[in-house]
Image: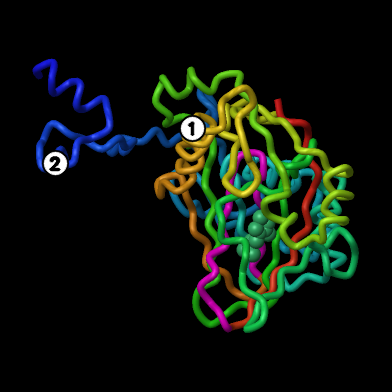
Amino acid sequence: MTNQTQTQTQTQPQSQDYLSRSYYPKRYNRGGKRILNRLPEGAQEQPYTLFTVKPLGPVIGAEIEGVDLSQPVSPELQKEIRRAFLEFKVLFFRNQNITSEQHLAFAKLWGELEKHPFLPQGNTDEVTRFAKDANVTGMENVWHTDVTWRVNPAFGSVLRLSEVPPLGGDTLWSDQAAAYDNLPDEVKERIDGLKAIHDFTPSFGRALTPERLAEKQIEFPAAEHPIVRIHPETGRKTLFVNAAFTIRIVGLEPEESEELLQYLFDQAKIPEYQVRFHWEKDSIAFWDNRATQHYAASDYFPNRRVAERVSIIGDIPF
Ligand SMILES: O=C(O)CCC(=O)C(=O)O
Ligand SMILES: [Fe+2]
């Protein structure tokens, strides 16, 4: 390469540069091998004895068969479900025609229940109801982790579909431990120790009057979380920023913050880290919100789709 070409590749392209093979657009595409570890390093796969586990892919998602969630969960069963939850990050149960009370009782096994300040419409403040039809479009079709704008983002959620559209309406989850594992070393070094700010304003804030927004901003100040969190139960490093709620990186200029965040958000879109679940009536998903992002495909309009979610409060990310 001559000095002249080097200069050209490093500065704004000249008008005809795209015709020459000395100009490459700046992109981060990296194909090839992906590191896909379901378990933390060194951990051994253990069998499950109280139910059948059907993995839906190499890293994330499994269907659990042989568990009836309308029945009380014994401590042994809970222990095994927890192990599967940590291993697969999202568990699916089919044909669970449970009541709202049974739904709440199952969620309560895992911790204190969350009251979402903007969404509920279920029977109690702990039940968030997403009812979509010809008048209400699905809005959860942005990759996100729930309530990261809280000091204590959710531990996880239990979501049940009571009405399923004839086609579409799938939900996808993305494994953020796999996303972290596959980051280039230079990116891992760059984000090590950095924190990001999470805010509800650009999403839920849009539906509020200026007065109510001001009130809610006082009640829920923007939260600061590490970009890479250590999973409190598995010890794995997990990428913890999302396009719905993370607004900037602490200490970086806006442009640099935006560029880095955009790159990190894009990791959730990589298919090898994902599972896509096709719902049937009375299917339930139980996901680890500390280690995943999700995306509810909004492709069934004007058909009806009804989901109810109960979330469990999580710890402060570290
Ligand atoms: O409706 C869905 O499938 C998921 C919606 C969502 O984002 C959530 O329940 O947190
Ligand atoms: Fe969500």
Query: Is 64 in front, or is 159?
Result: 159
User: Quadrant of the image for the N terminus?
Assistant: top left
Viewer-nearest of discs 1 and 2: 2
Q: Tell whether 281 sits left or right of 256.
A: right
Q: Is residue 300 above or below residue 147?
A: below
* Residue 60 point in image, percent of width and height: 51, 46
Quadrant for residue 129, please give it: bottom right
Residue type at tag 1: Leu
Q: Nearer the viewer, residue 257 or 147?
A: 257
- Measured as percent of width and height from the top left, residue 104 is found at 84, 59
Q: Which of 203 and 269 lies nearest the eye of the viewer?
A: 203
**Residue at horizontal 67%, vertical 45%?**
289
Residue at x-position 88% and y-position 44%: 219
Q: Is residue 94 left or right of residue 263?
A: right
Name the residue that disc number 2 marks. 16
* Magenta-colored span: 283-302
- Where residue 56 sits: x, y (%)? 47, 54
* 3, 175: nearer the viewer: 3
Element at label 1:
helix
Instruction: Examine the structure image and report whether residue 48 is included in the region drawn in magenta.
Output: no
Residue type at mark 2?
Answer: Gln
Mark 2 element type: loop
| Colour scheme of the picture | rainbow
Task: Name the N-terminal-most of marks 1 and 2.
Answer: 2
The picture places residue 113, in percent across and down from the top left corner, at 85, 50
Residue for badge 1: 260
Q: Quadrant of residue 149?
A: top right
Q: Is residue 316 visible?
A: yes
Tell me which residue sits at (19%, 26%) in the image: 8
88 to the left or right of 112: left
